[in-house]
Amino acid sequence: MNYKKLSVHTLIWAAITIIVYAVCYNYFSISFSLWLNAHVEGSILEVMSQYLSKLFSPRHWEILLLVSFLISIYYLIKNKYKNAQPWLLVFISLFIASVIAFVLKVILARARPELLLHQHIYGFEWFSLQHKYQSTPSGHAVLAFAGLLSIAYLLKKPIYLYLAIILAVLISCSRVIILDHYLGDIIAGGYIGIFSYLWSRLILEKVNQRFI
């Protein structure tokens, strides 16, 4: 896929994501969160979701970010670019996804579901560093898609791609189930994670064509 084609896909899916996000925000988020709070709290589904959410926390992805960077540097020093490339993809994908997610979280400053449930606060605060106002996008969803898709590429078997997508979806859904995010947050996060991976892969492919 070239820059032009990926740019078009990025814009089209951005528009679709924004529309779906707006629909969720205006019509589904409040009622769905209240329903989850009433019917899922304390259930085995919530317990499993909490475990999955902790297992794939941003802190763990930060460790992988550092590890992939160090491995990439090692192979580059040894002039083994082909060995470094998959690890560079993991690093760049996670780095780009993390930066975009952080910037949007601070700018949008959407109140998390906990504020809806306990203080009846719903909406955007705009520009906040407080955790309770960083609902959009879901960091777990962003990093799960960017990281797992990159790892699937590293493992070089098609089956891992499907497993990565399934696991990323489950991780994202867990964030809604435990009421840390709204549905629109994980949809936005999924979009950012997927296209962070796709752009990172395209960048590395272009570097290959030019220098190798």
Image (tube, grey):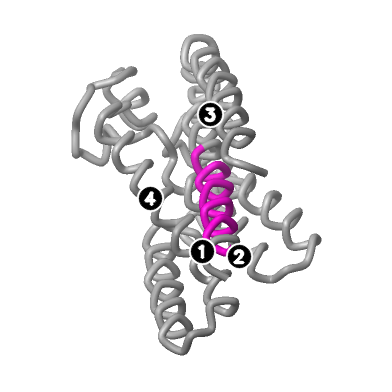
Task: Give the label, 2 or 3, closer to the camera.
Answer: 2
User: Amino acid under label 3?
Assistant: Leu
Q: Residue at x 31, y 18 (%)?
A: 120
Label 4 and label 1: CA atoms lie apart by 12 Å
Label 1 and label 3: CA atoms lie apart by 26 Å
**Magenta region: which residues?**
192-208
Label 3 and label 4: CA atoms lie apart by 20 Å
Q: Quadrant of residue 152?
A: bottom right
Q: Earlier in the sequence, mark 1 or mark 3?
A: 1
The answer to whether mark 2 and mark 3 are in CB contact below 8 A is no
The secondary structure that most of the magenta stretch takes on is helix
Q: Earlier in the sequence, mark 4 or mark 1?
A: 1
Q: Which residue is mark 1?
A: 90
Q: Secondary structure at mark 2?
A: helix
User: Amino acid under label 4?
Assistant: Ser
User: Amino acid under label 1?
Assistant: Val
Q: Compared to 177, does 207 lie above or below?
A: below
Q: Which residue is mark 3?
A: 183
Q: Residue at x 45, y 69 (%)?
A: 64
Q: Secondary structure at mark 1?
A: helix
Coordinates of residue 133 in the picture (x, y in percent): 27, 32
